[in-house]
Image (spheres, helix red, strand yellow):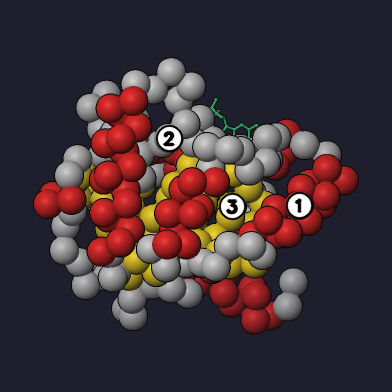
Amino acid sequence: MAPKEQDAEEIGRRLFAQDCVFILGAAALAQVPETALSEIAFAGRSNVGKSSLINALTGQKTLARISNTPGRTQQINFFTLGGRLMLADLPGYGYAKAPKDIVKRWTRLVNSYLKGRQALRRTCMLIDARHGIKDTDRPVMTMLDKAAQPYQVVLTKCDKISAGRLESLIGEVAKELATHGAANPEVIATSAIKGIGIPYLRSTLAALASPA
Ligand code: GDP
């Protein structure tokens, strides 16, 4: 690894080693906390591995447990990290059996949050490496485009597929991202279980943090 990349990973490691504190869960736009910090959001289908990824990034199991508590799964859960980043864990989507009013509520909450959130620096759009981008992900990507909120695809569970499949998947995803105005062209491959890509993702997010 080049010295510069090593430095960036060390900066990321140090930031994500700091205390991550639960602020609140917002079930409506009026409850979204004001913040002067840079914010990073995490979006993805239910079961994509969002909790596992946030745990792997922060090294704290309690945080994502909060987001998976009954009553909190339909909220945007906010955490501060080291007093320099706000993390916004968006509610999972894409339940096959989700009642229509839940889907409507999800769309209203997330869309209003994305449209008005000036602090938001990047959304990590999580995609399960075994499945690639699915039809339920596309409207969310379009919502991000329309809100002009920059996002980055993060592939999860990369330990589950071969290196060859991963390479072709990255190509397929990058090709689709080229058609989305707010998407970062880079696709980041991770595995929360094996720790793959975690130091790199920490370093890219740390680069967006508010100054110390
Ligand atoms: P969430 O619903 O998006 O928060 O997903 P979870 O983090 O709860 O993960 C859903 C399932 O995927 C669980 O059974 C996890 O153990 C599994 N999982 C999550 N991340 C990984 C990973 O990196 N590799 C593998 N093999 N499984 C994972």
Q: Which is in the foreground here, disc 3 or disc 2? A: 2
Residue 85 in sight from this viewpoint: no
Between residues 175 and 12, which one lies in front from this camera angle? 175
Residue identifier under label 2: 93
Label 1: state its secondary structure: helix
The three-letter code of the residue at mark 2 reads Tyr
- Judge the density around disc 2: few (<14), some (14-19), many (≥20) Cα neighbours within 10 Å: many
Residue 32 is situated, as x and y percent measured from the top left of the image, at: 18, 53
Residue 142 is situated, as x and y percent measured from the top left of the image, at: 49, 54
Q: Residue at x 43, y 73 (%)?
A: 208
Residue 154's disc is 3
Residue identifier under label 1: 172
- Specify which label sits upstream in the sequence, 3 or 2: 2
Q: Which is in the foreground here, disc 3 or disc 1? A: 1
Q: Please give left or right for residue 65 compared with residue 177 in the image.
A: left
- In the picture, which quadrant includes the N terminus? bottom right
Q: Please give left or right for residue 75 compared with residue 181 in the image.
A: left
- Specify which label sits upstream in the sequence, 3 or 1: 3
Label 2: state its secondary structure: loop
The alpha-carbon separation of the residues under discs 3 and 1 comes to: 14 Å
